[in-house]
Every structure is written in structure tokens, then in C-alpha cells.
Amino acid sequence: METPSSSVLQSMTEAEKYAFVREVVRLFNINKVAFVPKAEFTANSITLDAGSSSDALADLQVFNDGNEYHIDEAAATPGIDLKVDFIAVDAFQRVAINGVYVGALTTHAVSIQLYDWINTAWVTFNTAHPRGVNIKEDLSFNVPDYKNYVGTGSDVGEVRVRFNHTMGGNASHDLYIEYVALYA
């Protein structure tokens, strides 16, 4: 990526400057990853059990395409419960997520979990804490031992990622997910 000259930077809109900075941060984050992905798995389906959205699966399948999956948090318990399913996965090392949880800077948080098919339980790998503005952040995490998180039997090859706000929700809070993928 070529660095723009100062005259080019001055002529850029705020949105263009933001996009440039975001791309620099994305490239920095990719370069600090300890592995080069051999394969990328995109989500096959989503299930929204708490919260509301009018967006579609395709909105979280492509990185940096300008689309996002927006969830309005419910004023209920749980406030958000979104499951993102992947199929035909034999192994993976990383869950790549770009998104942000927007709300008042409170004790609210959204747990990012993987389903453990062996122990039939959700395991938290990361947490999205509220931000005051909709500026996406890297919520990715490594999964050194993936075996329990890939389904077997009738669920063979399935991986399930969940965004879960377990406490009572606040209708003025939102979760924006720009991208979710698995890297092998």
C-alpha cells in the first residue's frame, strides 16, 4: 500500500482518511499474526435469538466491504444472542472478527464464545466492551487446540461462534459486526 503525500491527505475527506487508517491498522494486525492462513471459512448461517436486526448473513462475510451486521440490543435478558455457524471445517487456528459494541461506557459487555461439542458448553475466548463510537476493532483470537470446537457425529465439521450479552440489555446499545471468519 502506497503512503499518500501530504497534499493527497489534505484533499481526502474524513471518511477517506478513516478508511486509509483502518486499512493501515488491518495490515499491521495481519502482519503481527503468527501464521499465514492456509484456508478461510466464511459463515454458512446465523441465528439471532436475542436482539433485533434487519441485516443479512452476507453483511458479515466479506472484510472491509462497507457492509456490517447490526444488532439492536434488546431491553431484556439476554440483550444479545447471535450464533454464527460454519460448516465443512476440519481444522482452524484463528477466529477473525472485526466489529464493535457501541453503548454507554458501562459494565455491559458481549462475550465472544465458541461451542465446545465434546463438553457441550460455551467457552468464552474474547469480550467486546462498549465503545462510545462506531469504530470497528479487531476482536480476533487464536484457538491453539481446535478439536473440541469442531463438531462430530451429526454435527461433523460444524463450528459455532456466539456473541452473547448475558445480562439485562439496554435498547440504546448496538453490536456492529463487519466480519467473522475462521482461518486454518
Image (cartoon, rainbow, N blue to C red):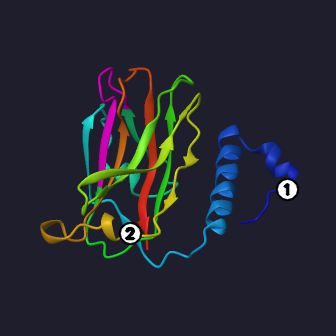
Give the residue at x 59% y 39%: 135
> Residue 116 appears in which quarter of the rendering?
bottom left
Q: Residue furthest toward the left?
A: 154
Image quadrant holding the C terminus, namely bottom left
Foreground residue among 125 and 172: 125
Say which residue appears at 40% left-offset and 21% top-offset: 170
Residue 51: image location, x then y, percent: 30, 31
Question: Mark 1, residues whose alpha carbon is within 10 Å: few (<14), some, or many (≥20)?
Answer: few
* Vertical placement of residue 15 versus 131, above or below: below
Drawn side of residue 123 relative to residue 96, left or right: left
Q: Residues within 10 Å of mark 2 (few under 14, many from 20)?
A: some
In primary-sequence order, the first of circles 1 and 2 is 1
SS label for mark 2: loop
What is the distance, in whole Å, between disc 1 and disc 2 at their CAs? 44 Å
Could you say where residue 28 lies in the image, as x and y percent from the top left?
A: 68, 61
Disc 2 marks which amino acid?
Answer: Tyr
Magenta stretch containing residue 74, yes or no? yes
Q: Is residue 115 left or right of residue 132?
A: left
Nearer to us: label 1 or label 2:
2
Q: Residue at x 31, y 50 (%)?
A: 122
Whole-percent x, y for residue 154 in the image: 12, 67
Residue drawn at the location 71% of the way across and 40% of the way down: 13
For label 2, the residue is 146
Q: Inspect the image, locate mark 1, and give the three-letter code of the amino acid beneath it.
A: Ser
| Residues drawn in magenta | 72-84
Tags 1 and 2 touching, CB below 8 Å: no
Residue that extends furthest to the bottom in the rendered view of this protein: 38
| Residue 5, numbered label | 1
The N terminus lies in quadrant: bottom right
